[in-house]
């Protein structure tokens, strides 16, 4: 089967060239930038081509991109014009699938762009946060060592009056050791279960017994704790708007699909492995 060609070579060449700038009063999507055997190439064609480039090429300077993309489109147009046979089935099917996908995407985009009413936003907020209980957040430090014996020795040293942060700097094998073992603030689910359980059982200022996790043995000090209330509407407004739009778009998809006359009986009995048979497209 013919492999898909890529036309990225012009960008390597264009990187060393400067594009002359011409003064234009107004540039539109249908502004023609080149013709190939009478076939127009427009700014709109170039914009779409840029949008589909790999990320590393999109970072190139605009003048490099402009020349590279125009070279690419000129080459593709000239090559495509040289094709005089009927299009292979794989190409017509690919074009059909791409057209379907782009049109469906446009419908979803329009649905997602619809205005969200204050009532919809409030309902989403209430569903997510109205009955949410305050969560506990903890500020803790720890000293990580390899064995339980080492952990017991560290605990005894601290209980004997040694400064927790200084012992952490000296003896902790964890990445937080150089900063005195500080882990900062964290909430439920952010630490492994055994560690989180031990922290939750401590009073502020308390030192834990040795705690074993997959990382080793910990001695933990609870520096502080606080209750985190539900966020204000404004803090999560953008997140809720996206959530509402996604829910409405999904509902639209399900509604349109349910309303369509769909008959899948022809697919019954077909071996699913046939999807790997590229030879059927030849």
Image: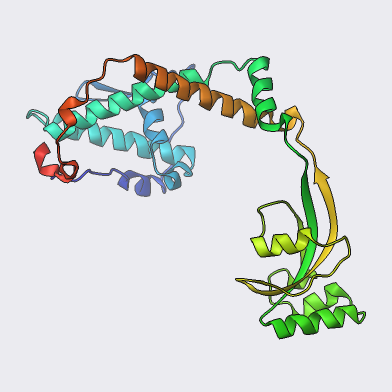
Q: How many marks?
A: 0
> Residue sitting at 68 percent across and 70 percent down?
175
Task: Pick whichever, 129 or 75, lies toward us.
Answer: 129
Percent x, y of residue 33 = 35, 25
Residue 183 visible to the viewer? no
Where residue 156 sits, quadrant-wise, is bottom right
Where residue 71 sits, quadrant-wise, is top left
Check the image and report above or below for 96 versus 260: below
> Residue sitting at 19 percent across and 24 percent down?
37
Task: Pick whichever, 214 or 31, lies toward us.
Answer: 214
Position of the N terminus, as image quadrant, is top left
Check the image and report above or below for 171 versus 227: below
Percent x, y of residue 275 = 19, 41
> Residue furthest toward the right?
161
> Residue sitting at 86 percent across and 57 percent down?
224
Color theme of the render: rainbow
> Residue sitting at 19 percent across and 41 percent down?
272
* Residue 277 located left or right of residue 151: left
Percent x, y of residue 153 = 79, 85
Where residue 179 sits, quadrant-wise, is bottom right
Check the image and report above or below for 81 versus 174: above
Task: Pick whichever, 80 or 146, lies toward us.
Answer: 146
* Residue 206 located left or right of residue 274: right
Percent x, y of residue 216 = 65, 75
Position of the C terminus, as image quadrant, is top left
Residue 31 visible to the viewer? yes
């Amino acid at each position: 089967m013919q492999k898909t060609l890529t036309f990225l070579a012009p960008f390597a060449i264009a990187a060393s060239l400067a594009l002359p700038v011409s003064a234009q009063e107004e540039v539109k999507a249908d502004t023609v930038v080149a013709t190939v055997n009478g076939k127009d190439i427009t700014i709109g064609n170039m914009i779409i081509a840029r949008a589909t480039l790999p990320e590393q090429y999109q970072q190139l300077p605009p003048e490099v991109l402009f020349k590279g993309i125009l070279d690419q489109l000129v080459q593709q147009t000239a090559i495509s014009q040289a094709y005089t046979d009927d299009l292979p089935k794989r190409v017509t099917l690919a074009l059909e699938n791409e057209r379907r996908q782009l049109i469906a995407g446009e419908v979803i985009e329009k649905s997602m762009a619809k205005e969200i009413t204050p009532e919809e936003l409030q309902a989403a907020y209430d569903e997510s946060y109205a009955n949410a209980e305050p969560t506990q957040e903890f500020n803790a430090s720890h000293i990580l060592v390899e064995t339980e014996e080492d952990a017991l020795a560290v605990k005894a040293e601290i209980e004997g009056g040694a400064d927790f942060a200084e012992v952490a700097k000296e003896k902790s094998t964890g990445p937080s050791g150089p900063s005195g073992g500080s882990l900062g603030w964290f909430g439920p689910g952010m630490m492994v279960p055994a560690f989180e359980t031990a922290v939750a059982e401590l009073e502020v200022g308390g030192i834990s017994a040795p705690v074993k996790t997959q990382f080793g043995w910990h001695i933990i000090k609870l520096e502080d704790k606080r209750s985190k209330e539900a966020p204000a509407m404004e803090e999560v407004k953008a997140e809720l708007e996206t959530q509402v739009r996604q829910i409405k778009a999904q509902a639209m998809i399900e509604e349109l699909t349910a309303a369509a006359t769909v008959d899948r009986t022809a697919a019954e009995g077909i071996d699913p492995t046939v999807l790997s048979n590229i030879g059927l497209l030849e």
